[in-house]
Image (tube, rainbow, N blue to C red):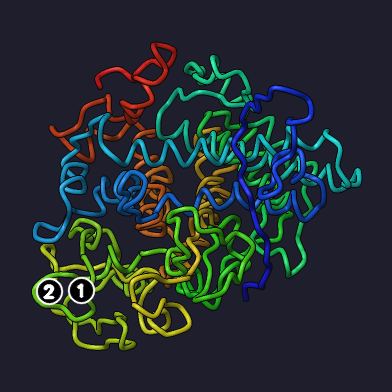
């Protein structure tokens, strides 16, 4: 269960106070400043939670900033071969992304870039203020520094996956004339990310108390060290880190696949890192701050997952958009008897569950509700379409987004062993563990393990934000997308606004 934890975060802008005399150089009485706020452990906790909360905005909906509409789903999931833009319901950007029409001026890239560097900035503020005058103990400083570095590394890792050579923002910049940062090299990014995760591994606790559920742990940092080294193709380092987590860590595969996506089994033993969302009319976890809207709009503390993913065509009850439609190719990727399938998508013959302001909706699934005859059921179903998981208007839900699960880590471990010349028996066991949980038998004798691992990642992690980045790092874009593929798509464009704002300091990725 999530725990109630009340914090107020005040994010202060740096400014210059001009005065005609010392007598007028006064502290404002109606606001907190960086000098007055960063004093107590509660102050610093609130500040670090603000960095976490920037992640929530990846999927945010807003009419006040960039007019975001669940942008991260578009460029991490809708763009893949697992999802098609619904031919009737999807918005224009989703259709363009689905067609691999990628433009630097489009909203998704500016939105996620802004949210990433906001999160980095907030983590850097915490690190900057730790050495100023405050009431923290030495232990407080160790943990907070480690947590801030975990977040800084996490955000930089996402930026690198998305943009290839994004800036490395490793401190607070106070010079107004030096705000723009240049592209960082891949080598420098890997070094900075791994260094920060190593410091996080050394300084974070293995587990937090129940009042701090959702905060990064040393084991999460260890897991990310392994994952980053897979991206780096440093197979020995990846094998060491991931093997340590598999053999000595606290994680396990949940007995039932669906427990990974039920709102009352959040933060379970399979979860390495998940994005926390709040409950109706209360801040019921430590991450919840309303970054997306200026008003006190409590529904925005949840995630509008069903609003975009639930069926929205041909008069389906529930009033959802139905922008993202699973593909038949994904349906066909599942083997007969795979128990995961009902918890991934609805197809002909299924019972459909949704929710609106009147409560749960239950009726036979109608294939005409989707242009592909399929609708996502992940995070949905009978268990999640209930009052405790939904805002009163039915548009937002409070179920966490599972970002990094032990199932993925086991498959990453298998990949490192296969690619790095490790023990193939251990690699095969990782794949079989995931298959067995899905009700499937062991791989056939002599099976191609690399092909099997890639297949298992696709069906195990469907609609989670991983497949696009696997396609690009494996270099299989042309195999998946055929003549529509262009190698420039291995990275996204930097937002046009950032290129222009940098006055030539930040270079655009080739081909955009």
Where is residue 339 shown, x and y percent of the image?
38, 74
Q: Does any portion of residue 171 appear in the rendered image?
A: no
Depth order, front residue of 468/320: 320
Establish if 364 lies above or below 250. Answer: below
Residue matched to label 1 = 347
Q: Residues within 10 Å of mark 1 (few under 14, many from 20)?
A: many
Q: Residues within 10 Å of mark 2 (few under 14, many from 20)?
A: some
Q: Secondary structure at mark 1?
A: loop
Q: Earlier in the sequence, mark 2 or mark 1?
A: 1
- Could you tell me if the residues under marks 2 and 1 are in contact, i.e. CB atoms within 8 Å? yes
Q: Residue at x 52, y 62 (%)?
A: 433
Q: Please state if 357 lies on the left or on the right of 143 as rendered.
A: left
Q: Which mark is residue 46?
A: none
Residue matched to label 2 = 367
Q: Please state if 193 lies on the left or on the right of 327 as rendered.
A: right
Depth order, front residue of 414/407: 407
Where is residue 275 shown, x and y percent of the image?
53, 58
Q: Quadrant of the C terminus?
A: top left
Establish if 306 lies above or below 11. Answer: below
Q: Residue at x 77, y 43 (%)?
A: 36
Q: Quadrant of the N terminus?
A: bottom right
Q: CA distance from mark 2 to mark 1?
A: 7 Å
Q: Secondary structure at mark 2?
A: helix
């Amino acid at each position: 269960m999530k725990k109630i934890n009340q914090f107020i975060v005040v994010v202060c802008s740096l400014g210059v106070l001009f005065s005609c005399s010392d007598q007028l150089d006064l502290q404002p009485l109606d606001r907190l400043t960086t000098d007055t706020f960063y004093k107590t452990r509660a102050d610093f906790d609130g500040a670090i939670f603000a960095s976490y909360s920037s992640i929530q905005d990846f999927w945010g909906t807003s009419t006040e900033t960039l007019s975001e509409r669940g942008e991260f789903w578009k460029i991490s999931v809708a763009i893949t071969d697992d999802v098609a833009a619904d031919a009737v319901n999807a918005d224009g950007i989703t259709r363009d992304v689905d067609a691999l029409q990628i433009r630097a001026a489009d909203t998704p890239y500016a939105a996620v870039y802004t949210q990433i560097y906001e999160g980095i900035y907030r983590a850097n503020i915490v690190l900057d203020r730790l050495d100023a005058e405050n009431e923290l103990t030495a232990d407080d400083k160790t943990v907070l520094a480690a947590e801030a570095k975990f977040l800084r590394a996490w955000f930089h890792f996402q930026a690198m996956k998305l943009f290839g050579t994004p800036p490395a923002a490793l401190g607070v910049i106070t010079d107004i004339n030096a705000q723009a940062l240049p592209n960082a090299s891949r080598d420098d990014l890997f070094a900075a990310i791994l260094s920060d995760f190593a410091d996080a591994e050394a300084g974070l606790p293995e587990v937090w108390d129940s009042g701090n559920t959702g905060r990064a742990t040393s084991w999460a940092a260890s897991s990310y060290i392994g994952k980053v080294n897979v991206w780096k193709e440093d197979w020995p380092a990846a094998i060491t880190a991931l093997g340590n987590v598999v053999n000595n860590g606290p994680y396990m595969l949940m007995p039932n696949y669906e427990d990974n996506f039920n709102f009352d089994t959040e933060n379970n033993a399979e979860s390495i890192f998940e994005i926390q969302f709040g409950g109706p009319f209360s801040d019921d976890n430590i991450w919840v701050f309303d970054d997306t809207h200026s008003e006190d709009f409590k529904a925005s503390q949840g995630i509008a997952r069903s609003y975009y993913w639930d069926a929205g065509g041909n008069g389906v009850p529930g009033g959802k958009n139905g922008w993202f439609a699973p593909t038949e190719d994904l349906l066909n990727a599942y083997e007969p008897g795979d128990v995961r399938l009902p918890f991934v998508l609805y197809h002909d013959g299924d019972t459909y569950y949704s929710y609106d302001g009147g409560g749960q909706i239950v009726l036979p699934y109608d294939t005409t509700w989707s242009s592909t005859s399929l609708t996502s059921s992940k995070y949905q179903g009978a268990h999640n379409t209930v009052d405790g998981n939904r805002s009163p208007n039915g548009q937002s839900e409070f179920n966490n987004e599972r970002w990094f699960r032990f199932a993925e880590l086991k498959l990453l471990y298998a990949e490192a062993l296969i690619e790095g010349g490790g023990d193939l028996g251990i690699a095969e066991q990782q794949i079989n563990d995931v298959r067995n949980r899905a009700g499937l038998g062991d791989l056939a004798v002599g099976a191609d393990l690399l092909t099997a691992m890639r297949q298992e990642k696709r069906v195990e992690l469907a609609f989670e934000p991983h497949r696009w980045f696997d396609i690009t790092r494996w270099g299989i874009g042309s195999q998946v997308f055929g003549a529509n593929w262009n190698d420039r798509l291995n990275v996204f464009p930097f937002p046009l606004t950032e290129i222009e704002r940098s006055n030539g300091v930040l270079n655009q990725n080739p081909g955009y």
